[in-house]
Amino acid sequence: MTEYRHVGPVKDIPPAAMVAAAQMVTQGKYYSLAASRFPGMPLFPGHPPFQVLNYRTPPGIKAEKAQPWGPPNDVGLGYMAEYVMATSHSGTHVDALGHMTIGDDNHWYGGGNTGEHLSDHGPLVGDAEKLPPFFTRGVLLDPPTHRGIDALPAGEPVGADELQAIAEAQGVEVRRWDVVLIRTGYLKYWPDADEMLKHKTAGPDLSAAEWLLEQGVVATGTDTETYEVQPAPDRGTPANPQPVHTKLLIENGIYLLESVYLEEIARDRVYEFLFVMLPVKIRGATGSMVDPLAVV
């Protein structure tokens, strides 16, 4: 089974690159790259809703005369606990390599496929349990600011030439081992679903994906639920509704982050930083909710 436990190019980040990323921290300031999660939050329509439900409350413990610690409890000690019922793709998250499949055999990066590697409790390989930690250089590319607008229109593609021009205008170079975050401005309006609708599913097109691969990135993210532009302007033959996911995640093991909150670092024009992300290792899950940091 070892041959299927690939984690993508991120596993090859050399120690020197991590040390160099750590040395970028000179101010001791961090930015959270996640928005809060709550019941009713906007989500990709293919995912179940996010729910938080009480399981234990102080009044409930008293009403049931429960003794979770065993007697005695003469001070009226109580506690609260809850169920969180949600997809691992709720809010800011990273797709595990087993999230997307393609072909008649439903295969994913590293040789996994549903015929051999899918159990009743999720994929056996390429699942969230295998997600690595991320501690490397991060780069923000900001198309709306480059264009002089607040947010890209709905369904607006961002191509390779524009990303290269933005990097040059911002004075940053995308390098091997980087995590590149691309702002569309969609989350500027969070959580106003009506206003967000005017800017949904803008994002990188296939040429941008190929450019990112050429630069040697290990992961990339946007502030939308779909990462790539939708509907895809370059579906190919036979038609592929998500060619960017196919190119990056399935074919090359490049991790995709979605719903990344980029408004604060864009406002402060923080274009390069130490990027830190620690996924939750849940066996069988196809992604992980994350609260990544940009540290400067």
Image (cartoon, rainbow, N blue to C red):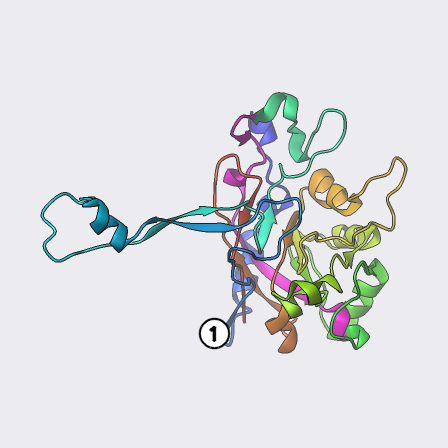
Which residue is depicted at the point 64% across and 54% down?
258
Q: Quadrant of the N terminus?
A: top right
Would residue 159 be found to the left or right of residue 150 on screen?
A: right
Q: Position of residue 209 (x, y in %)?
A: 77, 51
Q: Toward the viewer: 275 or 55?
A: 55
Would residue 268 be found to the left or right of residue 292 on screen?
A: right
Residue tagged by mark 1?
Answer: 28
| Residue 177 in the image: above or below residue 99 | below
Instruction: State the residue lying farthest toward the right.
Output: 237
Q: Position of residue 96 (x, y in %)?
A: 60, 42
Quadrant of residue 42 in the image? Answer: bottom right
Which residue is depicted at the point 74% across and 55% down?
215
Quadrant of residue 165 in the image? Answer: bottom right
Q: Amino acid at mark 1?
A: Gly
Q: Position of residue 152 (x, y in %)?
A: 78, 67
Is 123 magenta? The answer is yes
Q: Position of residue 284 (x, y in %)?
A: 52, 34
Q: Quadrant of the C terminus?
A: bottom right
Q: Toward the viewer: 1 or 20?
A: 1
Which residue is depicted at the point 72% across and 62% down?
197
Range covered by the magenta-colored residues: 119-145
Quadrant of residue 109 in the image? Answer: top right
Residue 13 visible here:
no
